[in-house]
Image: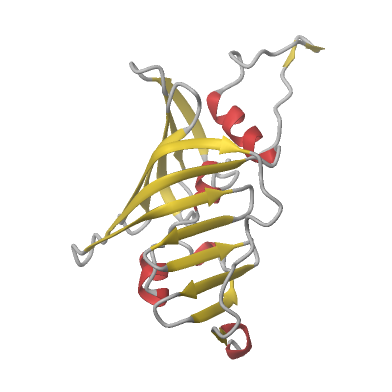
Amino acid sequence: MKKLACKLLILTVVTSVSLLFSGSLQTVTAQDTPAFDRLKTSFEEGRIFHSEFNHRYEDSFTGETEQNEGIIWIGKEQYKIEGSNQVMVVDGEISRVYDGSKNRIIVSDYIEEEDDFAPSRMLQGVDDSYSVQESALENGGTEIVLSSSDPFSIFERVTILLDSEGNPTEIRALDQAENILVTRFSGGSFTDAAEDLFTLEHPEDAELIDLRYNTQ
């Protein structure tokens, strides 16, 4: 997120689980299914998490803190952010940013490994190298902890808090450099995806800056 904020000056959950017992398949109710699997299934089914958010990045080396806020839509492989006269849309391959103050669009290849924010990736488990632990909270919610001992993993630990309805309320991540990323969601819920949700709307006269052609 720090890289995203500095570069663009903007603010910048997967498969169903089958359980076999003594060689026979048993019916699993929603209450029996781990909260993290239910969360991932929501994204796998094409639903969109929509929420206001506040994101904070704490640099362990410099001690600097960056904070951004806005409205976010998170899908299985995409996300969209609106805030402060700027809009960002990531579709898993391309990043598009419209800066209203300068009336320009910045297009670039999306490199997931370089995105410190990547909420869709965190909510879906980052990758298979992470172990998952869940614990119930007093408020009826769930705490999910993803941890990895792989030195090549981007994050050492990711903690996701869900409310009693299974909606994310907070993501706290610690990367290998001990930087801390905290994203809090307010009033979040899952909705059906609109056909043009991840389309970037902009004025016809906006300047286009396509960085994809400057990478070679």
Q: Nearer the viewer, residue 1 or 80?
A: 80
Residue 14 located left or right of residue 24: left
Q: Nearer the viewer, residue 195 or 212?
A: 195
Residue located 59% across and 87% down the image:
215
Q: Quadrant of residue 172?
A: top left
Residue located 51% across and 32% down the image:
132
Compared to 179, does 157 lie above or below? above
Picture coordinates of residue 16, whole percent (x, y) = 71, 30
Q: Nearer the viewer, residue 174 or 191?
A: 191
Quadrant location, the N terminus: bottom left
Residue located 35% across and 18% down the image:
139
Total numbered badges shown on the rendered structure: 0
What colouring method underlies this structural image? Answer: secondary structure
Residue 109 located left or right of residue 157: right
Picture coordinates of residue 25, whole percent (x, y) = 79, 13
Picture coordinates of residue 92, whole percent (x, y) = 63, 61
Residue located 61% across and 83% down the image:
212
Compared to 97, does 13 lie above or below? above
Q: Quadrant of residue 67?
A: bottom left
Compared to 72, does 109 lie above or below? below
Q: Residue furthest left?
A: 63
Q: Quadrant of residue 216?
A: bottom right
Picture coordinates of residue 209, whole percent (x, y) = 55, 86
